[in-house]
Image: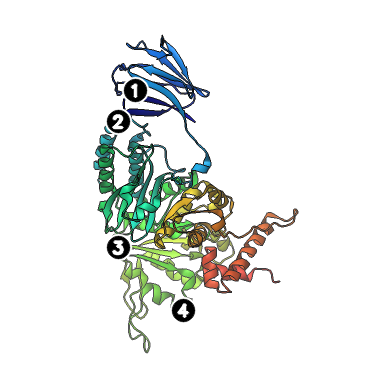
């Protein structure tokens, strides 16, 4: 890679020149490359890259272009050549772009543009970039309620404006835990210094945010941040994060806007964009919601988002239907009066406790038909009758149900009531398995790794490219939950201050069947192998094995019943 360097006395400006793109250079702030130095006209020249050369054409400037003592209309510069423009000198420098220089892949999948489309600026583009900073301040101030997505967009655009190579949000507590990263880290970044009181001696610029939080930025070039950059970064930290101290589980939002839990990484794939849109429509509809998807895809997190977006002032009650015995369902869900039987104490019941909020019925397909009839009445009448009571209690709750089963087949087989199905399915949202949205895997990996490192108070430089490749190629039968578990285990193996590498990942080996095996048998074989390995690693503990696989204990039990015996 090559770039143009403009020098005058003790100052320098460096500009990346993209291939097949023409840029303008001059002292006016409407140029692509702004160099406000003596002898440089407002619109002095055009600059473009031709192979390993940089072609500069004069635009009828007063002082022109000078090379080897001769004034020229155009000049070709390559590394080692020198020319003059006004009283400044020009030369071309080579910049290493080896992947070996990049220790982690953080920032690869973040947007190249932030809020308002702010572009990445070149070093020395001071006048234009200060204007962009002022625009950022105005845009941030015009955001009345800060969502997680909006905060991330503003953070990315601020990193571009301040020309940072790395911008971290950290938590200091004797050690350093990175919670967010914008940009990339290299071996020269000395992240260790951030965990000590000697960071002022490093090239990092740190902004304390209170309660151990810190914004840390590393400049892109060889020079430390200027005064305006430091002041701007201080403002960014205060604006985006200082007010976050003591906030609850959900990020505030405007009325009707979808609020995803801060524990959820949605992903930017087309599949998840469709889920986001469906959630937005569900939030606005007020209907009951049926969430469908494999175990571990994040159905409860989606239910939490729907609740937080419409009824966050009320309770959120999540019930695993498969774990509630039939004979206790009414008492658990609708409540029971004291004195019904000897030793029975009064219980309110989940539906009454959730008044004004949301009831999340997980694994609704596992309910017996007797229980289905009782639930149907509640949805129809919007009232519950506690066990032992003579008068029903009116309720105001929103019901969100989920299943990983084929409800239509259960209806055909006479195992699930069609009328209950239609009551639950006011709107349906299908959450795709992770293997069908592989584009989201790198972003999920980075987020889970940073979160896990923070939880165990480890400093993490990031995730290696090879590890990302390995994560992206795995099929993830346990979906996002399995991926988070695998990465949490990898962080335990990763050394403090190191990079999460492929050697730290303990992914189950795929099982390849004979060439004439059906797709169904191949999937079953891979699943059985994964179950066997999980049971072996947990020494037969089914609860831990289910957690490792990212499925429920009930689901593991069902799969074990169908597993071939040795």
The C terminus is located in which quarter? Answer: bottom right
Residue 384 image position (x, y, % from top left)? 36, 71
Q: Earlier in the sequence, mark 1 or mark 2?
A: 1
The label on residue 31 is: 1
The mark nearer the N terminus, 3 or 2, is 2
Task: Compare marks 1 and 3 and give the one earlier in the sequence.
Answer: 1
Q: Nearer the viewer, mark 2 or mark 4?
A: 2
For discs 1 and 4, the disc positioned in front in the rendered view: 1
- In the structure shown, which secondary structural element does the residue marked by tag 4 occupy? helix
Judge the density around disc 2: few (<14), some (14-19), many (≥20) Cα neighbours within 10 Å: many
Q: Helix, strand, or loop for circle 3?
A: loop
Discs 1/3, front? 1
If you read the primary sequence from the N terminus, does the residue marked by circle 2 or circle 4 appear first?
2
Crowd rating for badge 1 (residues with CA inside 10 Å; few <14, some 14–19, many 20+): some
- The residue carrying mark 3 is 314
Residue 126 bears which disc, if any? 2
Q: Residue at x 27, y 35 (%)?
A: 135
**Marker disc for residue 175:** none
Q: What is the C-alpha distance between the residues marked 3 and 4?
A: 28 Å
Pointer 3 local density, CA inside 10 Å: few below 14, some 14–19, many at least 20: some
**Quadrant of residue 268 within the rendered picture:** top left
- Vertical relation: 109 (above or below) 67: below
Q: CA distance from mark 1 to mark 4?
A: 76 Å
Name the image colouring. Answer: rainbow
Q: Quadrant of residue 558?
A: bottom right
The CA span between labels 1 and 2 is 12 Å
- What x and y, as percent, mark residue 109? 46, 43
Q: Residue at x 35, y 52 (%)?
A: 194
Residue on which the image places disc 4 = 327
């Amino acid at each position: 890679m090559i770039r143009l360097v403009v020098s005058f006395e003790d100052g320098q400006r460096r500009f990346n020149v993209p291939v097949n793109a023409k840029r303008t250079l001059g002292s006016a702030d409407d140029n692509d490359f702004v160099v406000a130095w003596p002898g440089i006209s407002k619109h002095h020249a055009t600059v473009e890259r031709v192979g390993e050369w940089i072609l500069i054409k004069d635009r009828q400037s007063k002082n022109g272009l000078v090379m080897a003592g001769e004034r020229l209309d155009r000049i070709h510069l390559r590394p080692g050549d020198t020319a003059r423009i006004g009283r400044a000198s020009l030369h071309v420098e080579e910049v290493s772009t080896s992947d070996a220089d990049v220790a982690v892949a953080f920032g690869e999948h973040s947007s190249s543009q932030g809020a308002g489309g702010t572009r990445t600026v070149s070093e020395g583009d001071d006048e234009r970039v200060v204007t962009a900073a002022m625009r950022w301040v105005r845009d941030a101030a015009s955001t009345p309620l800060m969502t997680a997505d909006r905060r991330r967009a503003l953070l990315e655009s601020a990193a571009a404006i301040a020309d940072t190579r790395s911008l971290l949000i950290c938590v200091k507590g004797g050690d350093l835990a990175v919670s967010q990263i914008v940009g990339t880290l290299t071996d020269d970044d000395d992240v260790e210094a951030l965990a000590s009181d000697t960071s002022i001696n490093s090239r990092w610029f740190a902004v304390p945010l209170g309660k151990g939080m810190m914004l840390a930025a590393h400049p892109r070039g060889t020079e430390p941040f200027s005064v305006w950059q430091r002041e701007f970064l201080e403002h960014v930290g205060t604006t985006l994060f200082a007010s976050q101290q003591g906030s609850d589980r959900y990020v505030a939002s405007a009325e009707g806007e979808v609020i995803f839990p801060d524990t959820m990484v949605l992903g930017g794939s087309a599949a998840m964009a469709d889920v986001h849109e469906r959630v937005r429509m569900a939030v606005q509809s007020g209907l009951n919601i049926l969430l469908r998807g494999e175990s571990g895809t994040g159905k409860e997190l989606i239910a939490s988002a729907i609740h937080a977006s419409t009824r966050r002032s009320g309770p959120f009650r999540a019930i695993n239907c498969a774990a509630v015995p039939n004979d206790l369902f009414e008492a658990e869900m609708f409540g029971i009066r004291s004195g019904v039987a000897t030793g029975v104490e009064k219980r309110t019941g989940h539906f009454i406790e959730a008044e004004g909020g949301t009831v999340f019925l997980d694994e609704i397909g596992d309910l017996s038909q007797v229980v289905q009839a009782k639930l149907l009445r509640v949805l129809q009448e919007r009232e519950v009758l506690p066990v032992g009571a003579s008068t029903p209690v009116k309720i105001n709750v929103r019901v969100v149900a989920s299943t990983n089963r084929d409800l239509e087949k259960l209806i055909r087989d006479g195992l699930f009531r069609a009328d209950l199905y239609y009551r639950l399915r006011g709107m349906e949202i299908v959450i795709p398995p992770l293997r069908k949205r592989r584009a989201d895997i790198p972003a999920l990996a980075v987020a889970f790794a940073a979160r896990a490192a923070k939880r165990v108070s480890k400093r993490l430089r990031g995730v290696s490219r090879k590890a990302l490749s390995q994560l992206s190629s795995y099929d993830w039968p346990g979906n996002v939950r399995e991926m988070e578990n695998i990465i949490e285990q990898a962080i335990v193996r990763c050394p403090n201050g190191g990079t999460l590498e492929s050697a730290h990942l303990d992914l189950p080996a795929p099982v390849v069947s004979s060439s004439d095996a059906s797709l169904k048998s191949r999937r079953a074989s891979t699943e059985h192998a994964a179950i066997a390995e999980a049971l072996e690693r947990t020494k037969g503990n089914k609860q831990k094995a289910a957690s490792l696989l990212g499925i429920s204990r009930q689901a593991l039990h069902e799969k074990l019943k169908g597993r071939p015996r040795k």
